[in-house]
Amino acid sequence: MNSRQLEARYEEERNLRLARHLGVTAEELDALEPEIDTNESADGLIYSYILNFHRDAPKELLTKVIGLASGSLTMQVELGIFHSEEIDDEF
């Protein structure tokens, strides 16, 4: 498996983990297209991830997102959500 394939596999796994955490399918997550930022210290220590959803994201999908406050387009998720020992071990 080359590095491009590993990167694609890692991204797919990351998206599946995020979708499960949010209570949506991978396809629904793709439709929502959240931007993922970090909540970090001045030293670069990451505390959590911040998901920013677009104003034009499908409202019916936004209402399905577990943990997203009604009317909000931003939420935080914990660091461990993207950790995958199987994939991490391959890098």
Image (cartoon, grey):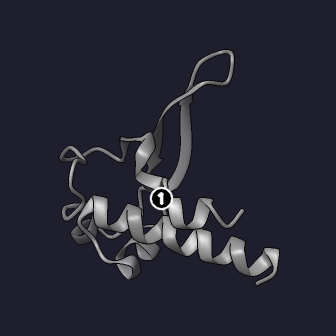
Q: Residue at x 45, y 41 (%)?
A: 79
- Image: 29 above or below 66: below
| Residue picked out by circle 1 | 34
Quadrant of the image containing the C terminus: bottom right
Q: How packed is label 1: few (under 14 Cα within 10 Å), some, or many (20 or more)?
A: some
Q: Nearer the viewer, residue 26 or 87?
A: 87
Q: Nearer the viewer, residue 91 or 20?
A: 91
* Disc 1 residue type (three-letter): Pro
Q: Position of residue 75 (x, y in %)?
A: 35, 42
Q: Residue at x 61, y 24 (%)?
A: 45
Quadrant of the image containing the N terminus: bottom right
- Image: 14 above or below 75: below
Q: Position of residue 67 (x, y in %)?
A: 22, 47
Q: Residue at x 25, y 48 (%)?
A: 68
Residue 63 relative to residue 29: left or right: left
Q: Quadrant of residue 42?
A: top right
Direction front: furthest residue: 89
Q: Nearer the viewer, residue 56 or 7?
A: 7
- Image: 61 above or below 69: below
Q: Position of residue 19 (x, y in %)?
A: 35, 67
Q: Position of residue 9 (x, y in %)?
A: 61, 77
Q: Quadrant of residue 40?
A: top right
Q: Nearer the viewer, residue 12 or 31?
A: 12
Q: Residue at x 21, y 55 (%)?
A: 66
Total labels: the figure holds: 1
* Element at label 1: loop
